[in-house]
Image (spheres, rainbow, N blue to C red):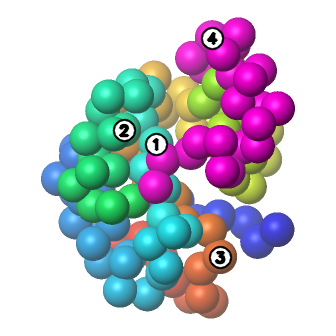
Amino acid sequence: MQKPIFKEFMNDDEAVRAIEKLKIRVNTENIYVITHNDGHTKRVSERTDANTVGVNETGFGVSIKNIFRNKGDELRANLQEVGFSEREAQHLESQLDKGAVIVAATETPEGVTIET
């Protein structure tokens, strides 16, 4: 699996601008938005048509396990399912705790970056 690219934002509008620029070079199906709050994630996702990490990405087994996990464990598991290492998932989850919005993309062409 190709390592996903990502960028952390502390502002929804910056994340939305970055996703809109990214959609020019990356299939929307491969763009994800992740926040610490499901409602927040859904709002940003709806503004941009970006994906959220769900059953399609994690599989049924992980989704069932997530029901019994605390939010931090659930977020780390979801991040790992889209291609982040355990260490990267821990770092990103700590940023989510601080209010960050994570924009991530999988299956990106060589040289693509996430810009605001």
Identify the residue at image location x=33%, y=39%: 42
Residue annotated with mark 1: 34
Three-letter amino acid code of the residue under disc 1:
Ile
Task: Report which quarter residue 61 is drawn in.
Answer: top right
Which kind of residue does numbered mark 4 sit on?
Answer: Asn
**Of label 2 and label 3, which has the lower sequence position?**
2
Magenta span has 18?
Answer: no
Which residue is at the far left?
13
In the image, the segment drawn in magenta is 51-72
In the rendered image, residue 62, in percent from the top left (x then y), is placed at 77, 32
Q: Secondary structure at mark 3?
A: loop
Membership of 69 in magenta stretch: yes
Q: Residue 70 bears which disc, if any?
A: 4
Q: Quadrant of the N terminus?
A: bottom right
Q: Which mark is residue 41?
A: 2
Left or right of 104? Residue 115 is: left
Q: CA distance from mark 3 to mark 4?
A: 29 Å
Q: Would you place residue 114 above or below residue 65 in this image?
A: below
Cα distance in 3D space between marks 3 and 1: 17 Å
- Main secondary structure found in the magenta portion: helix
Residue 116 in view in this figure: no
Q: What amino acid is labelled 3 in the image? A: Glu
Badge 1 vs badge 4, beta-carbon distance below 8 Å: no
Percent from the top left, x then y, of residue 83? 74, 55
Q: Secondary structure at mark 2?
A: helix
Q: Earlier in the sequence, mark 1 or mark 4?
A: 1
N-terminal of the pair, mark 3 or mark 4, is: 4
Tags 2 and 1 touching, CB below 8 Å: yes
Instruction: Pick whichever of labels 2 and 1 is earlier in the sequence.
Output: 1
